Structure formats: C-alpha cells, structure tokens
Image (cartoon, grey):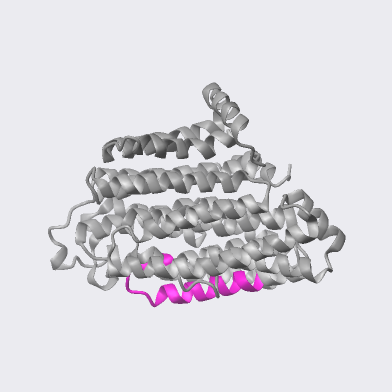
Amino acid sequence: MTISLIFVPIILVILLNIPRLSGKTAYYAVLAFFIWQILSVFFPFTGSQQLAGLIGKVFTLNVYADGMSKIMIISAAIVGFVSLITSKAFSKYDSRLFSLSNLMLLSFAGINGLVFTKDIFTMYVFIEVIAAASYILISLDKKDGALEGGFKYLIISSIATVMMLFSISLFFLTAGSTGFAEISTAIRDFGGNPVILAAVMLFITGLLIKGGVIPFHSWLSGAYAEAPAGVSVFLGGIITKTVGIFALIRILYLVTGFNENIKMVLLITGALSIVIGAIMAVTQKDFKRVLAYSSISQVGYIVLALGAGTAFGVAAALFHVFNHAIFKSLLFVNSAAVEKQTGSLDVDSFGGLGYKMPVTSGTSAIAFLSAAGIPPFAGFWSKLLIILALWSAGYQGFAVLAVVASLFTMAYFLTLQKKVFFGELNPKLENVREAPLSLTACAIFLCALTIGVGLIFPYILNVFIFPAVGIM
C-alpha cells in the first residue's frame, strides 16, 4: 500500500499529460484515485500489492504504514475528494481544472510519502513537494490577492525550509544517518550536545512555521482567504495539518521525545495560538478569514495536546487533526457555497441566508457546534480528550484554558452564524437560491461524518486512535 500510494499519483500525472488529456478526464481520474486511496486502507487490493512490488524493485524508500499514517491517508483522501468537487463547482472542464487536478495529484504524492516515511530527509523532501504544489494552487486564479497570498506562503515557508535542511545536516553529522531510529538513539545518548539541541530546535520550529501557529501565522490568513474556493478547502482541511502538525507529531513521538523544554514550548505556543487565533477571528469581516484564524486557534488545541507529553496527549492530538479536517472542510465548502450564490464573502452584507440556503445554514451550524466542542458531535470528544490529557499530565491551568477558549469559540461562531444565516433577510439577497447539488452533497457528507464519528466515538477511539499510538 505504501509505495503504490506514493507513486500512483505520479504515474497518473504522466498518463494525463502524455498525451495531454481533457480536463474532464483529469477530474474523474483524480476523483477515482481518492476513492481508491480510501478503500486501499480497508481492503488491500492484489493489484496494488503487485504494483508496489514492481515499484519497489526500482525505487527504495524507507517507508511503512501504521495506525497514524492510515488515519491521515483517510483524512487526506476525504478532504481531497471534497475540495476537487468544490473546485469543479466554480469551473468548467477547462485547462484550469486540468492544472488543479494535476497539482492535487502531486500534492498527494507528497502527503502519502510524508505520512509513510521513517527518514527525516525523506520527510523534508515530501514536505517540499507539497509546498511547491501549494504555492501554485494558491495563485492559480492569478488574482492580485491570490498572488500576494502565494508569495507570502513561499517566502515564509522558505525560511522554514532552510531551518529544516540545516537541522537535517546537524542530525546527520551527529547520528551518521537521517533515519528516525538512528536520530532517536543519538538524541537519547547525546541529548545534552549543543549540536543535537540546535538540530531539534530548528526542525521543530520549521514545522511550527509550516503549521501556521502563533507567532508564525502571518502567511496563513492570506493564503486561505485569497486562494480559489476549492483550494481553501484543501489547504484548511489537510495541507497545513500534514506538512506542519502531523509531521510534528511524528517527530516528537518517534524521534525527539518529550522533555520539559519541548513540552513548555508546545504548551505556550498552543495556548497563544488558541487565544490569539480566536481573538483575530472575532475581528474579521470576511467569511474565509474568520475560518482561517479559527484554524489557527484549532491547531493550537492540537499543539497544546502534544504539550502534555504523553501517549494520551498524542492520541487526543491525532483525533483532533481528523475532526478538524472534517468540520473545517465543511465550513470552507459552505463559505464557497455562500460565495457562489451571493458573489460575496463580506459577513456584514448578509443576513437571513438560512431562509434561502437551508442546507448550507444547517450544516454550518453543526460544523460550528463541533468546532466549539458541543456534544454529541465529533469535535466535543477530541477536545474532551485534550482536556483530560492535560489534566492527567499535571497541566490543570492549560486544561482550564482549553475549556474557557471553547466557550469563546462557540460565541464567535454563533455570532457568525447569526450574521450570515439568521435574522431578517437582506432584500438584496431575495433572489438567492440554495447552492448547487455538488456543494450541498459535499456539505451533507461531511456533516454526516461529524455526527457519525461523534455517535460512535468509543469504537473510533478503541479501534483507530488508541492503537495508533500504542494505547490498547
């Protein structure tokens, strides 16, 4: 499964471009790939195994699949599927859709490689594959705002790239290898070595920049808000969660471990992200910018959970990565629906849209409640695990902060829901209709996942989340 999921998207890019096929063919080929990726986790195909064997004879990669990688593979495929359908709602079967389909395939080659790798240099290479595709995706419409957002992402991400590459050279200098196991051994044996300490600090900081947490967040709101609608779903749902946060989980859990200094950095960074992201979200007037700053706040919860420094904390963080991918993708899909039907994202120009767009309004309300941690939705359970992980690790103050911040999250999301969907109908919106079936179907699908995962939470926890981090 591992090798084939990395190379199949690359092979598809080649087949789609030599000779160049139509945008329609590319679109359906990528949708089929996403479905195949989800199914391959649960039903290993003989053909996939044979293909992996053939590829393995030519290319040798230090990769493996575990519970963590499988959760991310499923999350990424769901978000990718929805984001491509959202993009199609704004585009015909044209060259732009063809380009977007190819870029998403390249992104998935990087995503799948990153979640399977056991080597820090290989991880870096796959992160840069994703980043390179993301720069172009953000700027795909060639509008001034999108070009500016892509340029900021390029510059700030490049700083993180330099830090990570220098860190890898230090790891190789001290460990003699770039494999996770060898670096972990070197850290355990020579943890007080200044070179090792510098390498750890640089790599973790690089990942925090890629993840867009406070104080490294300046690129994120522009990238999310100015990117094309479908790309915003892709970025907000999975890209930053993979290149920054999941990679951070991998490095902390498998390589560096959690010492007191690392835990304090994570706790403070996570707390600042939760609070400042929420405050910034309140001040925004653009629907997508509210969601962008909300993402910073929600990622703060994940980083805060990691700061507990326990397997329980890692499990809570991993579960919230999945839940955030689902409910934040749902919100970006609905922001796309509002934009398509009204031609605007200005929150103050709306009012009463729920009368005209009941599906969009209803699914948004559920996503907001899940994000705020209201039962029985999925977001409640992952936030509860985060609070319990912090409390059991002795960080009661941070646990209380997480609870209070959730109340604040609920307040600003309900305010957004009220401004956009409730109240009296703005006369200018009298002719607005519900979004196209493609967008409402995506919203209903993601909404059902949010509700379903919340209702079968014990099963998800015991079968997927706890085993992924070694808790049985």
The image quadrant where one finds the N terminus is top right
Does 215 sit above or below residue 191? below
Residue name at image x 27 percent, y 38 percent: 24
Instruction: Please check the rendered image and state whether residue 129 is part of the magenta-colored stretch, yes or no.
Output: no
Query: Quadrant of residue 226 in the image?
Result: bottom left
Nearest the viewer among 139 and 453 is 139
Q: Residue furthest right?
A: 189
Nearest the viewer among 421 and 140 is 140
Residue name at image x 78 percent, y 51 percent: 182
What kind of secondary structure does the magenta stretch mostly adopt?
helix
Residue 417 coordinates in the image, percent (x, y):
34, 64
Residue extent of the magenta highlight: 267-292
Query: Quadrant of residue 369 in the image?
Result: bottom left
Nearest the viewer among 13 and 386 is 13
Residue name at image x 26 percent, y 73 percent: 348
Nearest the viewer among 85 and 329 is 85
Instruction: Please check the rendered image and state whether residue 290 is part of the magenta-colored stretch, yes or no.
Output: yes
Residue 50 coordinates in the image, percent (x, y):
56, 23
Residue name at image x 50 percent, y 71 percent: 217
